[in-house]
Amino acid sequence: MQSITIQAPDDWHLHFRDGSFLIETVAATARCFKRAIVMPNLTPPITTVEMAQEYKNRILQAVPDNADFDPLMTLYLTNATTSKTIIEAKEAGIKAIKYYPAGATTNSDSAVKQIESLYPVLQTMSDEGILLLIHGEVTHHDVDIFDREAMFIETVLNKIVQSFPDLKIVLEHITTKDAVEFVSQSGKNIAATITPQHLLLNRNDLLVGGIRPHNYCLPVLKRNTHQIALQQAVASGSSKFFLGTDSAPHEQYKKESSCGCAGCYSAWSALELYAQVFEDLDALDKLEGFASFYGADFYGFKRNEGKVRLIKEDWQVPKSITLPNGNPITPFFAGETLSWKVKE
Ligand code: DOR
Ligand code: ZN
């Protein structure tokens, strides 16, 4: 196949950051995605409708003139979130709330310590049709980092799903066979996003032959049997699995450090990398559903109008990108040659 044209896609999970990052990150996403679910883990986190509206305005100011892009805002769940916040969010058109277990990842210190104490808030979300987006990892020191997702499903998510059978939940950036099975076997109100890195890589790509900090993200890459389960999930064409890049930029010096940040900045190449994955799985015909239909359907949005065309053409992902603040950032797959390219 030399080209593929799909309905314009959306990114159902990403991080734009703020301030001088926005000129770079918003343009990189708006080059091919029409909408994106914007993560609220800024410092301080986006916890109120007012903060979300101000953040949205800053994002919109960074959208290039020739682009048509709609940021979909989220709020950050904390132990101080109330049902009133949920009602206000709904009235302001906010569709989803992000639940980070405290300490799970970048800027999650102020996140949820006891999800049970927020059950009244989850009930309001369920009643109002607001989605719960979950970073599904336990954070106890005694649980091995490779087991944290499976343990979260067993000890936390199961209870939430049983307590709120109608609550719409997206288990974000899933990394394990356990998560694929859980989502597949759950009701139609449970779905998952999958990143390019978790489809393309496994933990050997992080640790063999030297530590590769630009492949480090959370949840961390798992063993190849889990990678294969994720590939099978997307190749199956199940509408429960859809595109969420988790593009998560950190300046180079923060990644290449003795305590490096988690996150892959994939916006420059994500759609092309997904195309590569689907082609390698002999499932290119399933790319459009994954990238452009299932997420919108699950969120209850109209599918996009317009098309995006990918052509077979070798190109090289830049080795480095300079942020407007002058600092370099290393994109995901930096310097690699990709064989699919979004036609501008
Ligand atoms: O790798 C990650 N980076 N995982 C997350 O959940 C957060 C993200 C970030 O904000 O950098
Ligand atoms: Zn994320």
Image (cartoon, helix red, strand yellow):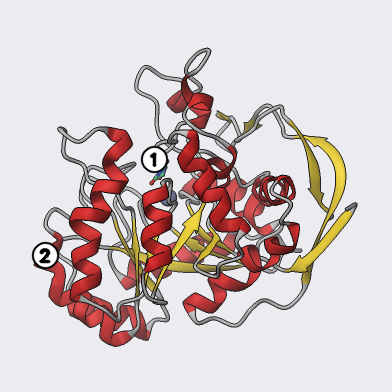
Q: Residue furthest right?
A: 2
Which residue is more in the foreground, 232 or 271?
A: 232
Q: Give the alpha-carbon distance from disc 2 to disc 1, as whole Å.
A: 24 Å
Residue at image mark 1: 218
Which residue is more in the foreground, 76 or 175?
A: 175
Q: Is residue 64 visible?
A: yes
Secondary element at tag 2 = helix
Residue 340 against residue 262 in the figure, above or below: below
Q: Is mark 1 within 8 Å of ligand 1?
A: yes
Name the residue: 48% across, 66% down. 56
Q: Is residue 146 left or right of residue 19?
A: left
Q: Is residue 81 left or right of residue 237?
A: left
Q: Amino acid at mark 1?
A: Leu
Residue at image mark 2: 116
Which residue is more in the foreground, 234 or 56?
A: 234
> Residue 266: image x %, image y %?
59, 43
